[in-house]
Amino acid sequence: MTVAFKTLGCRLNQAEEADFAAQFLAAGCKLADNDETPDILVLHSCAVTRAAERETFRQIRTWRRDPALVHTKIVVTGCAVSCNAPELFRDAGADFVIAKRNLPELASIIVASSPHQPSNRQTVKPSNQPVVASLPHQLSNCQTVKPSNQYHKRALLKVQDGCGFGCAYCIVPLTRGKPVSRPWNDALAAAETLLEKGYKEIVLTGCNLACYRDGTRGLAELTDAICGLAEHYGARIRLGSVEPCLCDDEILSVLLARRNLCRFLHYPIQAGDSAVLQAMGRRYTAEQILSLLQRLREKLPLIGLGADFITGLPGEDETAFAQTCALVDENPFVHIHVFPFSPRQGTRAPTLPNRPSRTVAKERAARLRELGDSSAATYRNLLIGHETQVLVEKRTADGFVTGWNEGYVLCRFRSDAPVATLTSFTPTHIEDGVLTDETPQPKAR
């Protein structure tokens, strides 16, 4: 039996996709080639916004209408399953709807049903057995898993899941449940397995990564320990999105002590106005965020910073939005992700007063993205003349390589370094938003 995957949403979903693929391989399946019609299609869904949910149902319907997939079993998993009736997915064309607690048995559930039997549109109900995470064998960071004989460039290591913060706008506690951390020894063993397989970058991921805890040890201690392992393999470690103002000083200490921890942090800031943050149930003020960013820049002037923002939150008037714009304008971010507010059933935000219209939320999102582009350009200029480390991801016939540096900026330069290895260069200028040392070519008139 052949299997292919499509994963929507965050890096945590991508890390879980790798676990699913490993399950199917262990069950005797193979990954479908690009030109091969798979026996099984697994859609790992997202529900963070209404648009993400709509994309889940759209994809199922598209696959079910495709004559080439008439005998293919369509399996849907993920966060959208946790907050929608299973009948909705079956009506769209899914054959299996797999609940979160059954994901460790995903492959065995599907393989147990013969691919030659008629579609039975099953819903698998949650079991009482505990979730047991398999070691992640990272197969792809792309939307669809594809086989390869080469080392993949970057591995995602899931070390935490769930969140109990209950922010007013967020549906994640409903879809992923309470915080759960991967046991310390299991996380270290999984990291070493990936390093032994040849990965030169491992990204630690979680639903609320800063909440990682095993006894008295938290995310900073785990990061430091995995960095220590990675040093022996000439590899680097990157942190996924980290909730601000939980373990900032501890993480900064590891950044200063471990050179193989990427100088990059991504924060789900969401807004730059303290009143809006308070209404949303966030655990910090705008002043604390500004202080954090300033402290990071003082210690690590070239650190790459990313952030998430939501426009159109209840209570966000023009003054509050201006505060968010000022935060982005005054702090050079590598990139920002901007989302118009999406009311989610089961959360508190839709009931809060003074919510801007959808039109206003979208217009503000567009304005903030423009500021984000300018902010990113400012940051890239800071890197000119400074040596930077790059994970080589592609090589061209004319001797150039491309890849992302430790601060998550795309680079292109001439090098003999093989794909999936780390190398360094010193950028001299920027060409179309890419750091390079290539001599600019005169533009045709």
Image: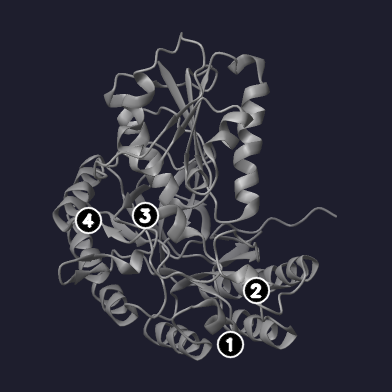
From the viewer's perspective, is 155 left or right of 167? left
Please provide percent x and percent y for residue 21.
36, 32
Q: Which of marks 1 and 4 is in front?
A: 1
Q: In this view, does 57 lie above or below 9?
A: above
Please provide percent x and percent y for residue 36.
52, 16
Q: Give the residue pinned by disc 2.
A: 313
Q: Quadrant of the N terminus?
A: top left
Residue at left offset 66%, top offset 15%: 67
Please provide percent x and percent y for residue 162.
37, 58
Q: Are marks 2 and 3 in contact (CB under 8 Å)?
A: no
Specify whether residue 418 is in view.
no
The answer for how far apart the CA atoms under marks 1 and 4 are is: 42 Å
Please tell me which of labels 4 and 3 falls first in the chain: 4
Q: In which quarter of the image is the C terminus?
A: bottom right
Q: Give the residue pinned by disc 1.
A: 275
Question: Which disc is residue 216 wearing?
Answer: none
**Mark 1 element type:** helix
User: Which residue is outermost to the top?
Assistant: 116
Please tell me which of labels 1 and 2 falls first in the chain: 1
Question: Which disc is residue 423 wearing?
Answer: 3
Please tell me which of labels 4 and 2 falls first in the chain: 4
Answer few, some or many: residues within 10 Å of disc 4's Cα (few below 14, many 20 plus, some between 14 and 19). Answer: many
Which residue type does callout 1 highlight?
Ala
Which residue type does callout 4 highlight?
Ala
Q: Give the residue pinned by disc 4.
A: 230
Please tell me which of labels 1 and 3 falls first in the chain: 1
Residue at left offset 41%, top offset 27%: 147
The answer for how far apart the CA atoms under marks 1 and 3 are is: 45 Å
Q: Nearer the viewer, mark 4 or mark 3?
A: 4
